[in-house]
Amino acid sequence: MEREVAWKKYDAEAKAELEALAASYIDFISQNKTERECAKSAIELAESFGYQPLETLITSGSTLKPGDKIWAHAQGKALMLIQLGSAPLERGLNILGAHIDSPRLDLKQNPLYESQGFAFLDTHYYGGIKKYQWLALPLAIHGVVAKSDGTIVEITIGEAEDDPVFCITDLLPHLASEQMEKKASAFVEGESLDVLIGNEPARAFEDSEGSEGSEDLEDLEDSDGSGDSKDPKDSKDKKDTVKARMLQWLKERYDLDEEDFLSAELEVVPAGKARELGFDRSMILGYGQDDRVCAYTSLVAQLALASETLERTAVTILVDKEEIGSVGASGMTSRFFENTLAEIFALSGVDSPLALRRCLSASSMLSSDVSAGFDPSYAGVYEEKNTAFLGKGLVFNKYTGARGKSGSNDARAEYMARIRSIM
């Protein structure tokens, strides 16, 4: 079966609509590179369309009615949007689902160290990555630090034009003969993905800018416990002065101490904005499209219903932790989805476990994630007659899984026929 290239079907109005969606999507993935950022941005957008927080409705004892729009979140990392229809909830929901986490590097709980005059952050990779792709790449740091006094500090370093960026070093070509003999999977080890963050020692900074940084040096060089500071020129203990400078910087900008890393969620991601790709600007190149391309379009589809009267309740769920198995309190294996629906049922005057079970059984869902489009540069890994092609429309996968459909979720023929009729 051949599919016509979708580009040929667009008139000027449809093309303008497409370009507007693409532009807003580029902004979304450029500004939101963590699951927390995606959830926060989606909530702000949903509230502008009239969505109300579930927690507020529960506290006020509100009674829900058809047309009401509600949002709920889990840990600030997963999100549900619900627009109630006129039909009873137990007749089922129309559900869109996608994930908002992406492969990245996470800082370990004790990440900061110095080696031979360089300061590094120790990382652990998250999700399936090709580790060699992260070498010599401008990197940014996004995330939050929860301080012991309850303060939450949001951090984004490496995205503003005047921000510094970071990198993971690579070998010069003429020093890399042994490295080049390795298989791609062993080209760089996971434990070697440490992020270079600085080189200037605290004393050099103090000499050039006055007294700044002296407190850190006094702490560092008071190695005999006497409380007397020592001149580093005379001290035998001159180590970690670059690390001290990094701690100065964090203290000055964010009022953070090294201990605060223990309760931080800091993610290392590629720096910079997503861009249009190609002379014709027909594609988008950027970090995090797995799976924010599905999450954003699901969000837009849900919000497009805001002014409509629905018969069947519409739900969009955007979750975390898919890249590592959907685990945890903000992943799809949690009870976030079921618990939120139970609260919706109660506020709608239906407090029945059986009604909730009937609702789940009668619901329909599109679980959206990226599909691999045919790439002629790597044609050997595709089965051409059963693969997706870029530019030929939306992709619907009847089943997933590996080898003999291991781990599969196989949609029945009747459901696929229903999707065909809708499209």
Image (tube, rainbow, N blue to C red):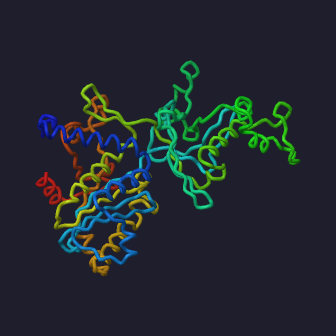
Residue 39 visible in image: yes
Which is nearer the eye, 2 or 19? 19
The location of residue 304, given as percent across then percent down, is: 22, 54
Query: Residue, x 27% and y 53% (percent of image)?
Result: 298
Answer with left or right where residue 402 lies relative to residue 411.
right
Query: Residue, x 60% and y 36% (percent of image)?
Result: 197
Answer with left or right where residue 285 lies relative to residue 141.
left
Answer with left or right where residue 257 lies relative to residue 377.
right
Q: Would you identify the image quadrant in which residue 276 lies?
A: top left
Which is nearer the eye, 407 or 25? 25
The location of residue 163, given as percent across then percent down, is: 52, 35
Q: Residue at the far front: name it.
A: 210
Answer with left or right where residue 75 lies relative to residue 355.
right
Identify whether 162 is placed above or below 400: above
Residue 116 visible in image: no
Identify whether 257 is placed above or below 139: below
Query: Residue, x 55% and y 52% (percent of image)?
Result: 153
Image quarter where the N terminus lies is top left
Q: Would you identify the image quadrant in which residue 316 lies?
A: bottom left
The location of residue 394, given as percent across then percent down, is: 21, 45
Query: Residue, x 17% and y 61% (percent of image)?
Result: 308
The location of residue 233, given as percent across then percent down, is: 83, 30
Q: How many marks?
A: 0
